[in-house]
Image (tube, grey):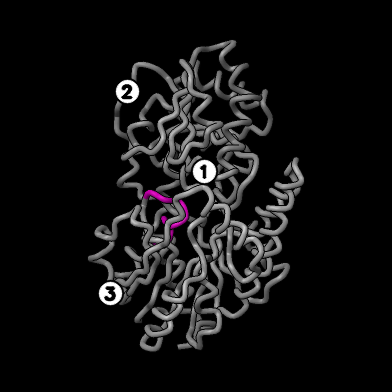
Amino acid sequence: MKILVLCHDIPSMNVGATIPIYHMIRELSDVHSIDLISFDSHKYDIKDLTKHLNDFKSIDIEEYLSTKDQLLYTLKNMLTIDNLKTRSFLNYYYNKDMNRLINENTDSYDLIITDMPMAFYVKNCDKHKIVYAFDAVSDYNHNMYKKSETLGSKLFWYLNYLKINNYEKCYDNFDDCIVVNMKDKLLLEKKLEVPISVVANGVDTSYFTNTKVDDDKLKLVFLGDMSTPPNNDAVKYFVEEIYPSVLEQIRIPFYIVGRNPTQYVKNLENKDIIVTGSVDDVRKYLSKNTIFITPMISGTGIKNKILEAMSMQLAVISTSCGISGIDAIDEIEYICADDGDAFKDAIIKLCHDEEYREFIGRNARILVENKYSWKNSAQKINDIINKKSIKK
């Protein structure tokens, strides 16, 4: 089958928002002819995907470098209901050149697969098409609105909620919608008629494998794009509510690993807290003596970072919110901790009990090998492509 894939930026294995598209292309290219059209922020390289693509076209993303331009752009998008505006896609906007490029190149395809931000470009296209929505973004924005403490913040998130809630209705123009867990499926089914399929994210188990590196000291690691509110909330919650009580019992450093740290996160750095910013290879921070923490209190979808840590055979401590969508067993494949005391106790236990730490890590690795490979995810997508609802 000849498939056109649309993505809001160059798909990369290092960026959570495009990782599923990256691996979908790699896996499906063995059985389908795949072309890609995307925006290009010039932050990521297409060369890793070139051999998996029949053709590739892109439109440069306009950069808003000054604070004034960013504020004007943000205001414009907040007041324009047809434009998608979230903090995750600051430079993403409706683009006439992209619209023209897509319209000129859709006729020859059997199927179009688009990620969530690009869906409105083809919502009225008379082709068989699938939207890879990942999660219920409107629900995330509504939750952020409810927890906002200032009038300005409440207004920002409520406008985004209204806009994205309206935007998600375009999914009904598609033959199928893919999300990464059952929670998001149930949320979207309340307002949509499109068939919704669950395809869990995966992990490259050959890339994220136990390095056998035995560091001298134990460390706590949080991994994620620090420009996103859920990751900032998680770090703030951990540093203010949990970490001080941990340090009262054991001196263990806390590494915050990820690009775009906010000023709040940068200001946390001290002798115990290390803020790395962007790193070329996260695996060097996921060595044997790492305890991986995900104290998430907001957010949607499946957290790729947890699957990566599990694949590295690490013990993971997570809130229920963080582990959502991952079918893992508490105290066997990870440790669930939904309050500060439970989180602190889990850290102390893993620090003092190396055998239990390794037990959790081994079982986590087995879990991702059996259930969360990208090959399995791609096979499920291929089944969706071939099922009767996608009429050929």
Q: Secondary structure at mark 3?
A: strand
Residue 299: % across, % down: 61, 48
The answer to whether residue 9 of the structure is visible from this angle is: yes
Name the element at disc 2. Answer: loop
Residue closer to the observer: 42 or 116: 42
Q: Which mark is residue 274?
A: none
Q: Residue at x 42, y 71 (%)?
A: 6
- Whichever of labels 1 and 2 marks the residue nearer the N terminus, that label is 2
Residue assigned mark 1: 227
Q: Which residue is mark 2?
A: 214
Q: Can residue 371 be seen here?
A: no
Which quadrant: the C terminus? bottom left
**What is the x, y in percent for residue 140?**
65, 53
Residue in view at x 58 percent, y 60 percent: 85
* Distance between mark 1 and mark 3 Cα atoms: 32 Å
For the residues carrying marks 2 and 3, which lies nearer the camera in this image? 3
| Label 3 sits on residue | 55
Label 1 residue SS = loop
Q: Nearer the viewer, mark 1 or mark 3?
A: 1
Please identify, in this view, whether the residue under mark 1 or under mark 2 is nearer the observer.
1
* Quadrant position of residue 313: top left
Amino acid under label 1? Ser
Span of residues in magenta: 14-21
Which percent across, then down, holds residue 147?
A: 73, 43
